[in-house]
Image (tube, coloured by chain):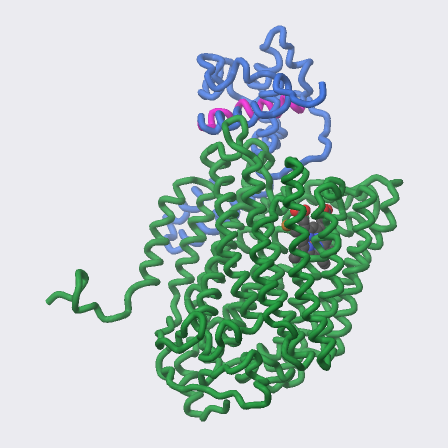
Chain colours: A green, B blue
Amino acid sequence: MKAPADRRLQLEQTWSDKPGLWGFLTTVDHKRIAARYIVTAMLLMFLAGMLALDMRWQLSVPENTRMTPQLFNESFSLHGSTMLFLVSVPLMEALGLWLVPLMLGQRNMAFPRLSAFSFWLYLGGVMTLWVAHALDITPDLGWFEYPPLSGPSYSPGHRADIWAQMITFTEVAALAASVNIAVTILKMRPPGMTLARMPVFLWAQLISSLMTILSMPAIMLVTSMLIADRMVSTHFFAPAGGGDVLLFQHLFWFFGHPEVYIIFIPATGFVSQIVETFSRRPLFGHSVVVLAIMAIGALAFGLWVHHMFAVGLPRLGNNFYTAASMAIALPAGLQIFCWIATMWSGRPWLATPMLWVIGFIATFVIGGLSGIMTASAALDLQLTDTYFIVAHFHYVLIGGAIFPLFGAFCYWYPKATGRLMSERWGRWAFVLIVGGFNLGFFPMHFLGLMGMPRRVYTYPPGMGWDLLNQVATAGSAISVLGGLVFVGNALWSFWRGEHAGSDPWRGSTLEWAGLSPTPPYNLAYTPAVTSLTPMWNGGDPLRAYDGIALERREVLITSVADAAPLYRQRSASASVWPFLSAIAVTAMFLGSIFTPWAVAIGSVPIAAALIGWFWPQRERTMTGLLRKRR
Amino acid sequence: MLIMTASVRGTERRTSIGANLAVACLIALACAGCSQEARNVGPTVPQTRPRDGADPRIALYQANVDQVAQGGRYFAWYGCQACHGESATGVRNLADGQWRHGGDFDQVFASIADRHGALRYAVRVPPEQLWQLTAYARDLPLHTPEKLHRQAVDQRAEPVGNSWSGPQ
Ligand code: HEM
Ligand SMILES: [Cu+2]
C-alpha cells in the first residue's frame, strides 16, 4: 500500500497535533496517549519492584530490623495496589488503545477525546497514591482493605481514603478506556473483517473490555460505600448497626476475581498474535481459542467466593465454588493446547517475543496447578494467608501477564519506534528475569507449606525458613537485574537500535501494513480484509479502499457482525477539554476525601468542563424545538 | 497558620499571593503529613504524667490520629462509655467543650486519673493509655454526633467485655 507523497502530506497535516506543550495537552492521538500510559505504568512497575526488593531484603534473614512492621505494611500495600491497579490493568488497556486502531486499519479510536480523558484520570490516580506516599500518608492495609479494619473506628486519618479514592480514579479511567475499545472493535472494523475474521488480539480486547464494564461498577460502589462509612458515618459495614462486613468482601471480589482475567485475557491476545507470526502459520484452532476466551470471561463472574473460603460457607457452597474454579482450567487448557499445536505444526522462530511466550506457558502452567490446589476449599483453609498464596499469585500474575507483556513489548517495539531491540541483550534479560523469577518464587510454595504466613515483617530463627527465604531474595534480585537489562535494552535501542523497516517479523495482522513508526494518520487507505491473516492472505496482496476524507478528520463506520461499510463519521479533533475535565474530576475526587461538600460543589466545574467538551460544532438545525429562529 | 501569614504578606506584594499560598499549602500539607498520620506500632517508652500544659510530649498524642483513636478504644474498654456515652449530660458530657477543672492536657489528665474516686484510674490504667484517653477526651468536642454514634456502633460489635463471644 504505497501512497503518493501528496496524499501522505495532506493526511499528515490533517491528523498532526500542534507542536509543543499545547499539542501535548490537547492531543487525542491514540498512539501518543497509549505511549504515555505505557511509560507511566512501566515507571511505576519499577518503583513497585523496588519496594518488593526492599521487602525481600527485610525478609532475607530472621528478626531483621531494617523495616518496622508499619513500614512493611505500607510497602506491601503500596506494592500490591500499584502493581494491580496502576500497572497491570492500565498496561493491558494501553496496548488496546495503541493497537486496536492499527489492527483495524483505522485512523483513531471511536471516541478520541475519551482516550485522552482516560489517561489524565489515570494519572490523577497515580499521583493520588504516590504523592500521598511522599507525604507519608501511605495506605497500609494491603491491596484489599477490608472493613472493619479500614472503617472509621480502626483506621483514622486518610490512609484508607487515599486507597479508596485511587481506586475510583483508576476505575473511571478503565471504564472510559473499555467503552472506547469495545465500541471501536464493534463498529470500526475494516470492510471484510467479519466477527469470524477478527484476530484473537481483538477478541481478547473486546471480551476484557466488556468484563471491565460489567465488573468495575462493583468496586466503585464498594469503595464509595467505604468512603461514605468513613466520612458521613453511614452503616454499610457496621454489623451492630445493621451493616455487613462481608458485603464488602463479596463486592470487592465480584470485581477482584474478574480483574485477574481482565489482566490475563489481553495477555492471551498477545500470545496468540506472537505464536501465529513466529510459527509462520495461521493460529491452530482460532475459533477454539476465541470460544475459550468467552468461556473464561463468563466463568470468571461465577467464582469470586473462592477468595473467601476462610470466611465460612455451607458445604454445598464450598463445593460449588470449588467446582466452578476448577472448571476454568478447561478453557485455559484448551488455549494452551492450541498454542502448542500451532508451534508444533509450524516452523517456530525463536526470536525474543517467542521466548517470552514459552516462558509464559511454562510459568503459567505452574501457577495454574497451584491455582487448582487453592481452588479446593479444604486445602485452601490450610494455604490461605501463607506464602503459598504469594507464590501462586505471582506465578499467575507475572507468568500469565507480565511475561506476555514483555513479549508483546519486544514484538511491537519496532512498530512503535522503527527500530529493533537487541536480540542478544533481549535473551540475557529473558534468562535473568525468568530464571530469577523461578528461583525467587518457587521456594515460596514450600515456605507456605511449612507455615510461613504472608504479610509478616519478620520471623524468628529456628523455624527452618531461613535458607529458602535467602534463596527467594537472591532470585528476586536476579530478576530485578534482568528487568534493568530489559529496560536498558529498550532505551539503548530507541536511539541506537537497528532500523526495522515497516514489517521486520513479517507479521500476520494489519498493524504491519503501514510505516513504522506509525504516522499520525496510521494507514493511507482503508484496507480490505478477506482472511484471518490479512498480511499473509495466502500470498495475495492486500487490497485497499479509498473514499475517506483527507482534508478533515474522518473515519469509516461499519456494521457490527459483517463489517459492511455504513457511513463516514467525523472524528473529534484535538481538544484541551478532556484535560480540563480530568482536572475538575480530580479536584472533586480529592476534595471528597476531606468533606462531603466537595461532591456538590465539585460537580459544578465538572459540568462546566463537560459542557465545553460537548459544545456543538454543527450548524443549528432548521426544524424542531431547538431550531434556529429568525 | 502558615497559610495566614502568607496571605497577609501577599497584601503588600499582590503578585505573589498565589505562589505564596501554593507554597504555604504544600508546606502545611507536608508538615501535617509527616506527623499527623504517623503510625507507630512498635513498643513505646514508659510514660510519666504530663509535667504541665506545655509538656512537649503532648503533641505526640494530641496531634496524632492513631493515638487519639486508640484512646477511643480504651474509652469503651474501660467503661468510660457507661457514664460519658452519647446521651451524657451536664458535667458528664465531655463533648461540649466545657471543662470544670480546666481543659489543658495536664488538667484533663488529672481529672481522669485522680478524680474518679473508687475507680482509681491512676493505678488501674497504665500511663500511656491515660495519655491516649486524655487525648481522646480533649478531641471529643471536634467529633460530630454521627461520628460518635458510628464509633459506638462499631465498638458494640467488638467481642470484648459483655459481648465476648469466643471461648470462655
Ligand atoms: C520483582 C518482582 C516482584 C517481587 C520480588 C515481588 C515480591 C513481593 C513481596 C515480597 C510481597 C509481600 C508478600 C507478603 O509479605 O505477604 C508481594 C506482595 C504482592 N505482590 Fe509482588 N513482587 C513482584 C512483582 C509483582 C507483580 C508484577 C505483581 C502484579 C502484577 C505483584 C503483585 C503483588 C500483590 C497483589 C501482592 C499482595 C499485596 C498484599 O498482600 O496486599 N507483585 N510481592
Ligand atoms: Cu479468584
Q: Residue at x 80, y 44 (%)?
A: A64
Q: Is residue A465 magenta?
A: no
Residues in magenta? B128-144
Q: Is residue B132 magenta?
A: yes
Residue extending farthest to the left is: A630
Seen from the viewer's position, the closer of residues A589 and A340 is A340
Query: Is residue B32 visible in this depiction of the protein?
Result: no
Q: Is residue B141 left or right of residue A271?
A: left
Q: Residue at x 70, y 48 (%)?
A: A375
Q: Is residue A440 above or below residue A544?
A: above
Chief secondary structure of the magenta portion: helix
- Estimate the x, y position of residue A85 in percent, counting from the top left: 58, 54
Residue extending farthest to the bottom is: A4
Q: Is residue B148 above or below residue A73?
A: above
Query: Is residue A376 visible in this depiction of the protein?
Result: yes
Q: Is residue A13 left or right of residue A144?
A: left
- Estimate the x, y position of residue B1 in percent, counting from the top left: 47, 39
Q: Is residue A404 above or below residue A321?
A: below
Splitting the image into 4 quarters, where does residue A395 fall? bottom right
Seen from the viewer's position, the closer of residues A141 and B22 is A141
Q: Is residue B147 left or right of residue A381?
A: left
Q: Is residue A100 above or below residue B38?
A: below
Seen from the viewer's position, the closer of residues A627 and A593 is A627
Q: Is residue A311 left or right of residue B105?
A: right
Splitting the image into 4 quarters, where does residue A550 fall? bottom left
Q: Quadrant of the C terminus of chain A?
A: bottom left
- Estimate the x, y position of residue B56 in percent, counting from the top left: 62, 30
Splitting the image into 4 quarters, where does residue A422 fall? bottom right
- Estimate the x, y position of residue A318 in percent, counting from the top left: 66, 41
Q: Residue at x 50, y 55 (%)?
A: A124
